[in-house]
């Protein structure tokens, strides 16, 4: 099998979109489709399930994805050994939230490009709560994530910085703000049970907030469950409820002036933000080099 064909399959396996892979690879959609079909013919197994709405990996496709990744990585290492041994070349796949791209990754990428200019960074963005799952599924080499309370055994975590988790209320006069201020004025403090909360639908922050509710004996009134801290800050700024978000997200959201942070007697611990990767992926010189540059960039932070 050709390395080029394996690379095309890996792109489709990642995007699950033939058109998007064609754009990334500078190929026509039909050429991408033919490449995958030839691989399926060689294997005698369908690698993808296709219908009019979506593309999915089959069981054989998921297994073949790991083979393809290993083969491409081995080929890149061989080329380096036979060529310029001092210069790394290849691709590192990263996953993070939009906020993390410029608040966390920017200084790392600047330093990495200087030391390893031939390495291409393949960036994917989305809800930070999906980062650990994508790493465990093998979709990306490295993800920016909060530190999980229980670390999966085959995963490594590199702490980079800490960001306080802040309780936020709307800055503008509205019913939600009035409820919080009226409750806070009482001698017994805020009765959270009657105040609408906007909470993350999954992820580490959700686990921390759920634990806080249990410890405080609060049965929250959930107004909405949303994906991403950015959405929480936006909805609080619109006066729809109270939320909890990392300080760095609030500052970067463009909505900082529309929310007020409030102190609570017992708050949440800070969120430790860092990189996560499978231990086996760190055996790759490309991934390990990125990991090391990140650690050096934030060496004095955590």
Image (tube, rainbow, N blue to C red):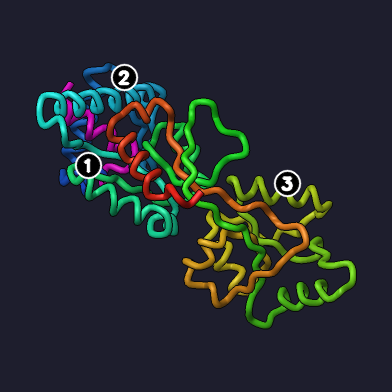
Q: Which residues are magenta?
A: 1-20
Say which mark, if any, is on residue 213: none
Image x and y of residue 11, in percent: 28, 38
191 vs 235, left or right, is: right
Q: Is residue 18 magenta?
A: yes
The correct choice, above or below, for 66 with respect to 212 in the image is: above
Label 2 CA crowd tier, 10 Å (few <14, some 14–19, many 20+): some
Residue at 89% in and 67% down:
188
Label 1 CA crowd tier, 10 Å (few <14, some 14–19, many 20+): some
Say which mark, if any, is on residue 211: 3
Secondary element type, mark 1: strand
Total numbered labels placed on residues in the image: 3
Assess whether mark 2 and mark 3 are in contact (beta carbons under 8 angstroms): no
Say which mark, if any, is on residue 119: 1
Quarter-of-image position of residue 198 = bottom right
Specify whether residue 16 is in view. Answer: no
Secondary element type, mark 3: helix
The correct choice, above or below, for 15 with respect to 9 in the image is: below
Front-most of residues 252 and 35: 252
Specify whether residue 141 is in view. Answer: yes
């Amino acid at each position: 099998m050709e390395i080029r064909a394996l690379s095309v399959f890996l792109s489709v396996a990642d995007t699950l979109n033939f058109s998007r892979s064609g754009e990334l690879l500078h190929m026509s959609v039909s050429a991408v489709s033919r490449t995958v079909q030839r691989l399926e013919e060689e294997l005698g197994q369908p690698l993808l399930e296709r219908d009019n709405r979506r593309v999915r990996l089959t069981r054989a496709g998921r297994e073949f994805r790991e083979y393809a990744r290993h083969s491409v990585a081995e080929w890149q290492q061989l080329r380096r050994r036979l060529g310029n041994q001092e210069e790394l070349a290849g691709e590192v796949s990263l996953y993070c939230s939009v906020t993390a791209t410029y608040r966390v990754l920017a200084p790392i990428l600047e330093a990495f490009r200087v030391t390893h200019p031939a390495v291409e960074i393949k960036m994917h963005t989305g809800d930070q709560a999906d980062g650990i799952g994508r790493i465990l599924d093998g979709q990306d080499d490295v993800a920016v994530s909060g530190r999980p309370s229980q670390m999966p055994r085959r995963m490594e975590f590199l702490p980079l910085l800490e960001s306080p988790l802040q309780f936020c209320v709307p800055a503008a006069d509205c019913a939600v703000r009035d409820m919080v201020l009226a409750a806070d004025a009482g001698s017994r403090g805020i009765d959270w049970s009657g105040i609408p909360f906007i909470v993350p639908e999954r992820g580490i922050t959700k686990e921390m907030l759920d634990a806080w509710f249990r410890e405080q004996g609060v049965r929250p009134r959930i107004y909405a469950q949303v994906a991403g801290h950015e959405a929480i800050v936006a909805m609080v700024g619109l006066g729809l409820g109270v939320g909890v978000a990392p300080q760095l997200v609030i500052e970067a959201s463009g909505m900082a002036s529309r929310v007020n942070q409030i102190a609570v007697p017992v708050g949440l611990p800070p969120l430790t933000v860092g990189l996560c990767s499978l231990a086996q992926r760190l055996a790759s010189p490309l991934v390990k080099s990125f990991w090391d540059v990140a650690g050096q960039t934030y060496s004095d932070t955590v």
